[in-house]
Image (cartoon, helix red, strand yellow):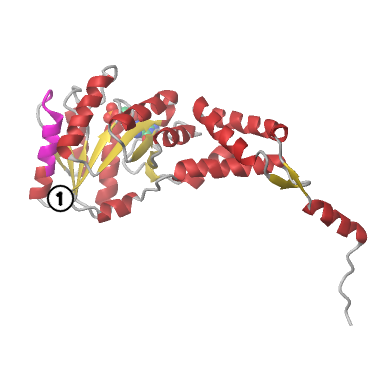
Amino acid sequence: AVRPPKISLVDKAKSLILEREVIIDERDLEEPLWGLEMALLESDVALPVAEEIVSSVKSSLVGSKKKIGSDTGDLVESALRAALLKVLSKNVFDFDEFIKNTPKPVKILFVGVNGTGKTTSIAKVARYLKERGYSVVLAAGDTFRAGAIEQLETHGQRLDLKVIKHKTGGDPAAVIFDAIEYAKAHKKDVVLADTAGRLHTNINLMDQMKKIVRVTKPDMLIFVDEAIAGNDAVERARLFNESVPITGTILTKTDADAKGGSAISIAHVTGKPIIFLGVGQDYPDLVKFDPVWLVDRLLG
Ligand code: GDP
């Protein structure tokens, strides 16, 4: 008969030691937490956001138990990974499902400051929807910036989409309202509305956004900003979200920013999801945001 292998006394003793647990105290965490905070900062996560996330990881670990012999660094890293995923997965938002389930025309307003890629993102989303069989109308709601209407019209021509416009200087809420009426009359599925994004006059801009929202009652409000803007983008996200609560963010130019920590900061300060990433200048350069992918990229 085959005998089961004997467990040696030494192995038994080892396993007993391994099963024993110790309480984690603050000193054990100092070094690994410091290292991870540096990693977050190097990935362009805003300082207050990195500090807040790291301190929440710290308080979740201090006083908890770990097996003797297990690596505190590993524990800290997996706690941080969980904390980052929590920030990024808050209010998970499925864009495709939302479009499918919202009565037509679905009204989507794009907000954000000039130069961040708002108009390009509108065109990208228009193409994304067209590819999925939806009919799309564009509303030239940036009546402030010279050239904004023409820019949207150029995209409209390339993508073969109707663009509703008024004159430069006109009332943006009225343009968007007209686009919605057009969509209703012509049974279009989605209205994508541009808005002004002039810098330096934030108070007026926010008042204008509030008025547009009041008049047009959008189903979705997408904040657009660029990954390379760092803390400026985070502050703008906060400002817009406080004035006209956003549904989520499109973070552009992530192809230029290899790290993407601003996604963490923006999701953290707004409490809203990142919906898409802009990954280039062409229409197909729009990808659905995947929290796991970003956290893997940040933590390696
Ligand atoms: P707007 O003023 O916010 O409407 O910005 P535009 O849509 O005009 O974009 C400003 C510039 O950023 C243009 O040159 C775009 O081609 C470029 N851009 C927009 N999105 C992206 C992106 O995801 N990646 C890169 N590399 N460039 C982008």
User: In front: 185, or 212?
Assistant: 212
| Magenta segment boundaries in residue numbering | 168-180
Residue at the location (40% across, 48% down)? 92
169 part of magenta stretch: yes
**Where's ligand 1: which quadrant?**
top left
What percent of the width, then of the height, locates residue 244? 27, 33
Residue at the location (31% across, 54% down)? 97
What percent of the width, then of the height, locates residue 62? 66, 38
Q: Quarter-wise, where is residue 73 in the image?
A: top right
Q: Secondary structure at mark 1?
A: loop
Residue at the location (62% across, 33% down)? 36
175 over 207 or under it: above or below = below
15 part of magenta stretch: no
Name the main secondary structure of what is drawn in magenta: helix
Which residue ends up furthest to the front in the rendered image? 63
Question: Number of labelled discs?
Answer: 1
Which residue ends up furthest to the left in the rendered image? 185
Residue at the location (27% across, 46% down)? 127
- In the picture, which quadrant includes the C terminus? top right
Whether residue 141 is visible here, answered yes or no, is: no
Whether residue 221 is visible here, answered yes or no, is: yes
- In the picture, which quadrant includes the N terminus? bottom right
What percent of the width, then of the height, locates residue 66? 72, 46
Please indicate whether residue 270 sits to the left or right of residue 189 in the image.
Answer: right
Q: Amino acid at mark 1?
A: Lys
What percent of the width, then of the height, locates residue 85? 51, 44
18 over 6 or under it: above or below = above
Badge 1 crowding class, 10 Å Cα cut-off, few under 14, some 14 to 19, many 20 or more, is some
Please indicate whether residue 216 sits to the left or right of residue 126 in the image.
Answer: left
Instruction: Determine which residue is flagged by label 1.
Output: 188
Q: Quarter-wise, where is residue 60 in the image?
A: top right
